Amino acid sequence: MFAPLTWFLVALSLAAALFAVVLAARDKRINWTLLGMLGVIEVALVAQLVVGIVQLSGTTRDVSGPFFIGYLIGSLIILPVGAFWALAESSRWGAGALAIACVVIPILELRLYDVWTA
Amino acid sequence: MTDPAATKHGPGRILIAVYGVFALAATARAGVQIATKFTDAPIAYLLSAVAAIIYCAATFALAKATKVSRKVATTAIVIELIGVLAIGAFSYAAPDDFPDATVWSHFGQGYGFVPVVLPVLGLLWLRRTR
């Protein structure tokens, strides 16, 4: 596990979630700033997948491969689906739904870390 | 409200997002468990698969939000509530039969107890948008 990338993902995802909550609270819809943040997170998640596969193939640790790869791949699906779901809603609740998607990323990263260090 | 589409709008948007997360989590979990170590705890893993199917059905039915799909969603969520309460209670009563947790074990403790709250919110929301 490349810790700085993991913590970067946790921090940026939480920031995006907070931003989405602020938008929802102010009765605003999702904007390009938020979508841009999601884009950066998604790129970092792809990097995390690559780093994860490389490190998994070179480690002597007793890591559960299927779960590890499962979390890595699963994390890529969350934000695109969440953004699609949120954009189809013309009220503040779209931003709220996207906040849920953003919160899932840090949870997955922490689970990933658990699987790696188990 | 008489418009069945109301189910997927407003706060329902967030509810369905949470259901979607659980549908994905339960499906992935059951898939990995069954594919890699089914013989370790077949009953627990089959229950994982049932939970996954229920979450997927509830998610799609809530998101479709037609008159018929609302009935499907209600049925799925009632089964979900019974499932989480029954497996939650059973996993405390007979922990040896659950060597590896399902989504509903210990009332969804591994998932911040969201699994036990979610069906209640789901049924309340279906009632509210009736």
Image: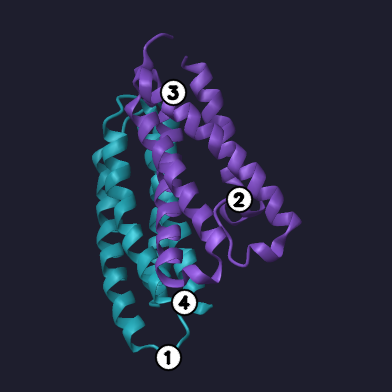
Chain colours: A cyan, B purple
Q: Residues within 10 Å of mark 3 (few under 14, many from 20)?
A: some
| Residue that numbered label 2 is attached to | B108
Say which chain tag 3 marks. B
User: Are discs 3 and 4 less than 8 Å apart at CB?
Assistant: no
Say which chain tag 1 marks. A
In the image, taking residue A6 as reference, residue A45 lies left or right, namely left
Amino acid at circle 3: Lys
Question: What is the spatial separation of the Cα atoms under label 3 and label 4, in whole angstroms?
Answer: 42 Å
Q: Please provide percent x and percent y for residue A64.
A: 44, 76
Mark 3 vs mark 1: same chain? no
Amino acid at circle 1: Thr
Q: Which residue lies furthest to the top in this view?
A: B2
Amino acid at circle 2: Gly
Q: Which residue is drawn at 29% across and 50% down?
A: A38
Q: How crowded is mark 1: few (under 14 residues within 10 Å), some or many (20 or more)?
A: few
| Residue that numbered label 4 is attached to | A116
Callout 2: helix, strand or loop?
helix
| Residue that numbered label 3 is attached to | B71
Q: Please provide percent x and percent y for residue A98.
A: 37, 41
Callout 3: helix, strand or loop?
helix
Say which chain tag 4 marks. A
User: Are discs 3 and 1 less than 8 Å apart at CB?
Assistant: no
> Splitting the image into 4 quarters, where does residue A93 fall?
top left
Which circle marks residue A60 in the picture? 1
